[in-house]
Amino acid sequence: MSSLLAQCLLAFTAGLLMNLTPCVLPAIPLKVRMILDSAESEVGPRIGSALAFLVGTLLLFALVGGAMAFLRLQWGFLFQSEWFLLLLVLVLLSAGLATFFDWSLRLPQAIYRLDSGGHLKPFLAGVLTAVLATPCTGPFLGGVLAFGLSQPPLLFFGLFLLVGLGLSLPYLLLLLYPRWLSKLPVAAEWSPRIKELLAFILWGGAAFFARSLVAETWSQAPVILWGALLFLWGVRSWFCGPSLANRLLPLLTVVVSLTLLFTVYGRSLDSELHWQPYSAVALASLAGDRPILIEFTADWCLNCKVLESTVYADTQVLEAARDTRLLAFRVDLTDSDPLNLQLLLDSGGAGLPFALVLNRQQEIVRRLSGLFTAEALTSALRRADR
């Protein structure tokens, strides 16, 4: 019972910490608007909005958790559908336009008649928050998923709902106690620029997921287009801003964002690990007396891309790879592949990011799940070389 209680606490904590991972970043603008829209309401409507947000989040987690528990589908399986990705890109683009130009999206009248309480927006914000959380695992979540898959389906289902509750908690508290927002600095003249910035966050999410919908040759085009539009926005805001404070926010945003883009996409190929596509035949023929790193990744996994541009490109990791003559394999789960999914499950993984470090005898030295540090990977590589 104590082990089960510990896993329940880990599931709730994992959901809470997912709010700090890159995957849920595109959902932040929607949640900010939802909270601000409810801030001036009475207690009753705020409680209704909080419950609607929670129901939306838990509903999506219930559907995904049920599919994993009863159908044994992969965490993140939704993102292996091009139709789902296309719909998500369109939703993020539309939400960005509505935020940037302060539009109200018009929905069919039948939906408005059903939404008599005015809680549709927080419900949809909860659904989208849960959707954007599902392609990646954050701290503790990989272990919780691996534990849950070894348990009866109903228990795994319950753990999933606890993850959703943890993910929702910060926004539930802000909806119920909006006066906490009064402790934040408020600058009315910044508000139009802040709304425009939130729109670019939504468009950034759309650009990232759009990469999986185009040919590999053009995969970076959506991100480059987003960066170009961001740069033009910064230039326009600098020359058209009514005050220095109003112009500094866009300028700072452009400098930081474009610096990150060049850092991620401008790395030399010589500074990266020499990845090879994974196959059992390649592993058997190439391994020999060398440590092995196997990364499970996907184009739609934002946390995976963060690791690939930071941890896997870290100087100490590259040095350890050279010293140990590391053999690095990638298992691509961008598209649905039963063999690769089974390999992930057989290796003790349940979601992305996930990596294995094997020693010279091809025994697992360490499993790395979610976001991890360069120090953790370097230590595992050194240990595998003994």
Image (cartoon, rainbow, N blue to C red):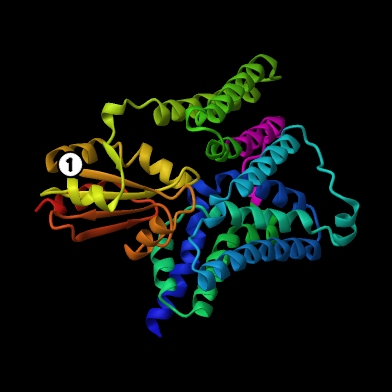
x%, y% of residue 202? 63, 39
Q: Is residue 165 above or below residue 308?
A: below
**Residue toward you, 38 or 236:** 236
What number of labels is visible? 1
Which residue is identified by label 1?
320
Quadrant the N terminus occupies: bottom left
Whether residue 261 appears in this view of the structure is: yes
Task: Specify the farthest residue to the top.
Answer: 239
Q: Quadrant of residue 6?
A: bottom left
Q: Amino acid at mark 1?
A: Ala
Q: Is residue 6 positioned above or below 269 on the image?
A: below
Residue count near mark 1 (Cα–Cα under 10 Å), binned few <14, some 14–19, many ≥20: some
Q: Is residue 52 above or below residue 197?
A: below
Q: Does 100 lie within the magenta span?
A: no
366 to the left or right of 183 = left
> Which image quadrant is residue 208 in?
top right
Would you say 213 lies left or right of 32 here?
left
Q: Secondary structure at mark 1?
A: helix
What residue span does the magenta drawing correspond to?
Answer: 181-204
Q: Looking at the image, which residue is at 17% across and 41% down?
A: 320
**Magenta segment main secondary structure:** helix
**What residue lies at 60% left-to-right and 61% top-to-bottom?**
168
Check the image and name the residue furthest to the bottom.
1
Where residue 351 sits, quadrant-wise, is bottom left
One can see residue 29 in this view: no
Image x and y of residue 128, in percent: 65, 53
Residue that appears at 73% across and 63% down: 52
